[in-house]
Image (spheres, grey):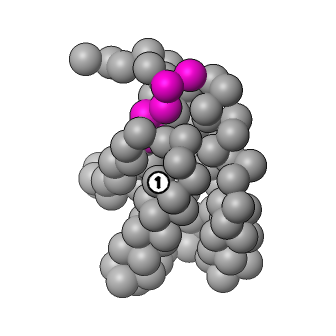
């Protein structure tokens, strides 16, 4: 099993309802791909003063579990995935950093 962990950082703060909808949309489209076994999303818990740190600060974390790298590659080419990404990028630009890794626990 491989975990695909994404650190999502929106350029501007989103209202809670918008962030909830983004996370729901990403979870749904990834699961609908048929290549993802599970998806977990969480909001970043801010630390006071972190905005002064010259680093990519998360808005949210998305972690998907897949069987292998082939399944991960297929998940990101499944119908609807890029439409959801493009929809959100056009409304609320964001950056993503990710890591593919074995389960941490």
By secondary structure, the bulk of the magenta-drawn segment is best described as strand
The quadrant of the picture occupied by the N terminus is top left
Q: Residue at the spot x=70%, y=35% of the render? A: 73
Position of 16 relative to 48 (above/below): below
Point out residue 23 in the picture as x, y percentages from the top left corner.
43, 65
| Membership of 105 in magenta stretch | no
Evaluate whether residue 4 shows in this view.
Answer: yes
Q: Residue at the spot x=56%, y=73% of the render? A: 12
- Provide the residue designation for mark 1: 31
Evaluate whether residue 55 shows in this view.
Answer: no
Q: Nearer the viewer, residue 60 or 29?
A: 29
SS state under label 1: helix
Point out residue 6 in the picture as x, y percentages from the top left corner.
52, 42
Position of 101 relative to 28 (above/below): above
Based on the displayed image, in which of its 4 quarters is residue 102 positioned?
A: top left
Position of 45 relative to 84 (above/below): above
Point out residue 30 in the picture as x, y percentages from the top left corner.
52, 54
Q: Nearer the viewer, residue 17 or 83?
A: 83
Question: Which stretch appears magenta?
Answer: 64-68
Left or right relative to 80: residue 24 = left
Which residue in the rendered view is the most extreme toward the front? 34
Point out residue 81 in the picture as x, y percentages from the top left corner.
66, 60
Q: Nearer the viewer, residue 79 or 26?
A: 79
Left or right relative to 46: residue 91 = right
Q: Nearer the viewer, residue 16 or 22?
A: 22
Left or right relative to 80: residue 9 = left
Numbered disc total? 1
The quadrant of the picture occupied by the C terminus is top left
């Amino acid at each position: 099993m491989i975990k695909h962990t994404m650190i999502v950082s929106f350029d501007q703060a989103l209202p809670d309802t918008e962030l909830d909808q983004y996370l729901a949309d990403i979870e749904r489209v990834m699961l609908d791909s048929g290549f993802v076994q599970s998806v977990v999303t969480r909001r970043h818990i801010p630390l006071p003063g972190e905005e002064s740190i010259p680093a990519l600060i998360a808005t949210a974390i998305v972690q998907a579990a897949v069987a292998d790298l082939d399944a991960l590659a297929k998940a990101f080419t499944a119908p609807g995935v890029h439409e959801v990404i493009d929809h959100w990028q056009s409304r609320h630009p964001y950056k993503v950093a990710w890591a593919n890794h074995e389960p941490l626990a």
